[in-house]
Image: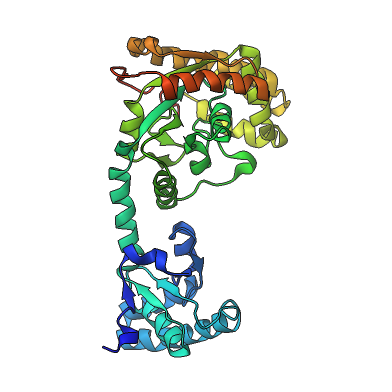
Amino acid sequence: MAAKDKDRIVPLERIEEFDTIIDARSPSEFLEDHLPGAINLPVLDDTERRIVGTIYKQRSAFEARRLGAAWVAKNLARHLQERLQQYPPSWRPLIYCWRGGQRSAAFVTWLRLIGWPAAQLAGGYKTYRRWVLERLVDLPGRFAWRVLAGPTGSGKTRVLQALAQRGHQVLDLEALARHRGSILGTWPGGESQPSQKAFDTALVAALRRFDPQKPVFVEAESKRIGLLQLPDALHEAIRLAPMIVLDTPHECRMQLLLEDYAWLGDKPEALARRLERFKGFVPNETLRRWQELALRRDLATLFAELIARHYDPLYRRSLARHPELGQAPKVRLVGLNASALDTACREIEIWGVDFNLAGYHPASCLCAPSDR
């Protein structure tokens, strides 16, 4: 093998050596998940990939490869004329496809013929996905977790954001999942959640940035956030970690809910339909009243009743099942302004960073059970 060709196929461990990571898979494959920072330059689009696959299965491998090669050449030529015009001769791209097969091999061949020292990721995305799953088992147990708990609307996310601004390590699971974890927890504007694979990738990227010598703050969450599942090792690490409970006045909770969920009032009919998910959790008469409030855009009354008749009772039942959680320290959050958040953060810092928590290991996560 010529010296210039010996680095044509490289393992995942060498990914940092390259200037650009190129995902040669189809757009739908890329959308489901991809290596962090990768750009999508498909050698076959979704329709082309489906047609080639059908011919391969139903007619012959030769016909599929012949047609696929023509489309690959066409697409690579377009990429060279458009996206790849900017790069100098020293540019080092790493290309991957599903399992390090023909799609990425063809791309690498073209780039190396031109003169770029391109390489192919050994095993492709399939190898990367296996690595992600291994990290999700391994990484959570390395960190000293500190869990913020409290009833719905108590300001856990606001406090986490304030802690992050003060330089602390924070894992914002709801931001990564694009969901607030409850029946009405759809992300503002109705933005869809990432795929489970993309969520897993984002979790690993976040966990790898943390310093094991410092605590990591996280919100108490159920196993499920919307449609997504927390990895078992992470959920268990959070479940067993020391907690602090936010004690937030009712008026402050209502202010927070009206700020964070105001967008729901923009489409009252859609909100009324979403409330159908409470069917079976509350009497039908109550559900009809809530839907009427939604249609009238009376969010203040609606949220007050949701708290009083659904979320707070769920939270109290959770507390009753785990009386040992009464030992958890409490921090008063008296408002949502910078001063109030700063005061709460200072108390949490004493508890979560300096206080000796040896021997405090609650048996369960202080959060309402899933109401989905």
Name the foreground residue: 29 vs 330: 330
Task: Please say if 282 is above or below 271.
Answer: above
Q: Who's the residue at 40% across and 34% down the image? A: 214
Q: Who's the residue at 50% across and 77% down the image? A: 91
**306 on left or right of 10:** right
Name the foreground residue: 133 vs 147: 147
Please give the count of numbered marks on the rendered protein.
0
- Whether residue 321 is visible: yes
Residue 26: x %, y % from top left? 46, 69
Quadrant where the N terminus sits is bottom left
In the image as oriented, which residue stretches furthest toward the left? 1
Task: Please say if 363 is above or below 179.
Answer: above
Quadrant where the C terminus sits is top left
- Whether residue 60 is visible: no
Q: How is the image coloured?
A: rainbow
Residue 136: x %, y % from top left? 32, 45
Residue 185: x %, y % from top left? 55, 33
Residue 323: x %, y % from top left? 34, 9
**270 on left or right of 110:** right
Q: Who's the residue at 31% across and 48% down the image? A: 135
Task: Please say if 121 is above or below 202.
Answer: below
Residue 143: name its quadrant: top left
Residue 234: name its quadrant: top left
Name the foreground residue: 190 vs 31: 31
